Amino acid sequence: MSRSTLSTALLDPATRPRVVDALLVLADAEISTKKGISGTMLKTAFAGAKKASESNVRKGIDRILPGMARSLDPHYDAKGDVAFGTYLSDPARSGQVADELLAVADSAATRVEGNPLGKVYSSFRGKAKEHVVAALPRLGATLETFVH
């Protein structure tokens, strides 16, 4: 019996809506931890984008999920017995993983100009890598729950 790949598990039509829901919860949780002026700005911008159209935020997550899942496949395959969040957040690879995920997000962001989510993304892209690196432990743990 072949083992399920991360992307196969996450993109399964029966599972994908739950993955999107979990990623929306994860985004809320990660953003709520941000401090200082930039944290306040990020919280305000994300809340505004959700208020303007939570369905667009959900659609945005759903739109980047395939690319995100495929970019994480090799990492999931290489993790061995290590928890996925721990594997992703290892300083030896976290920067590379963040760059790969941001490349997916950058590609999607070019297609959502004028959309509130695209505006939020572009205004925070400069500091995005540090936020993505910080989110890797929870991201890996969240996604791993969907692989059987």
Image (cartoon, rainbow, N blue to C red):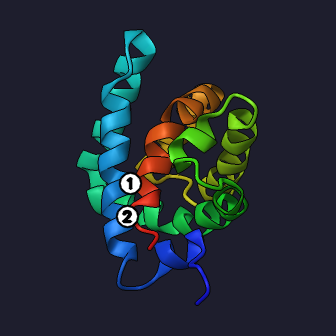
Crowding at dot 1, Cα within 10 Å, few <14 / some 14-19 / many 20+, comes out as many
Q: Position of residue 41 (x, y in %)?
A: 39, 22
What residue is shown with label 2?
20
Q: Position of residue 4 (x, y in %)?
A: 56, 78
The residue located at (60%, 60%) in the rendering is 68
Rendered-image quadrant of the N terminus: bottom right
Q: Position of residue 120 (x, y in %)?
A: 47, 39
Q: CA distance from mark 2 to mark 1?
A: 5 Å
The residue located at (48%, 72%) in the rendering is 10
Q: The residue tagged with tag 1: helix, strand or loop?
A: helix
Q: The residue tagged with tag 2: helix, strand or loop?
A: helix
Q: Position of residue 56 (x, y in %)?
A: 37, 61
Find the residue positioned furthest to the bottom. 1
Q: Which mark is residue 141?
A: none
Using the rendered view, name the quadrant where residue 13 is placed.
bottom left
Q: Is residue 101 visible?
A: yes
Using the rendered view, name the quadrant where residue 34 is placed.
top left
Q: Tell me the amino acid under the disc marked 2.
A: Val
Q: Is residue 12 left or right of residue 48?
A: right
Q: Looking at the picture, does residue 129 appear above or below residue 145?
A: above
Q: Looking at the picture, does residue 115 appear above or below residue 32?
A: below
Q: Which mark is residue 23?
A: 1
Q: Is residue 44 visible?
A: no
Q: Is residue 78 left or right of residue 146?
A: right
The residue located at (34%, 73%) in the rendering is 17
How many marks the image carries: the answer is: 2
The residue located at (57%, 69%) in the rendering is 6
Rendered-image quadrant of the C terminus: bottom left
Q: Nearer the viewer, residue 12 or 42?
A: 12
Using the rendered view, name the quadrant where residue 7 is placed.
bottom right
Mark 1 and mark 2 in contact (Cβ < 8 Å)? yes
Q: Tell me the amino acid under the disc marked 1.
A: Leu
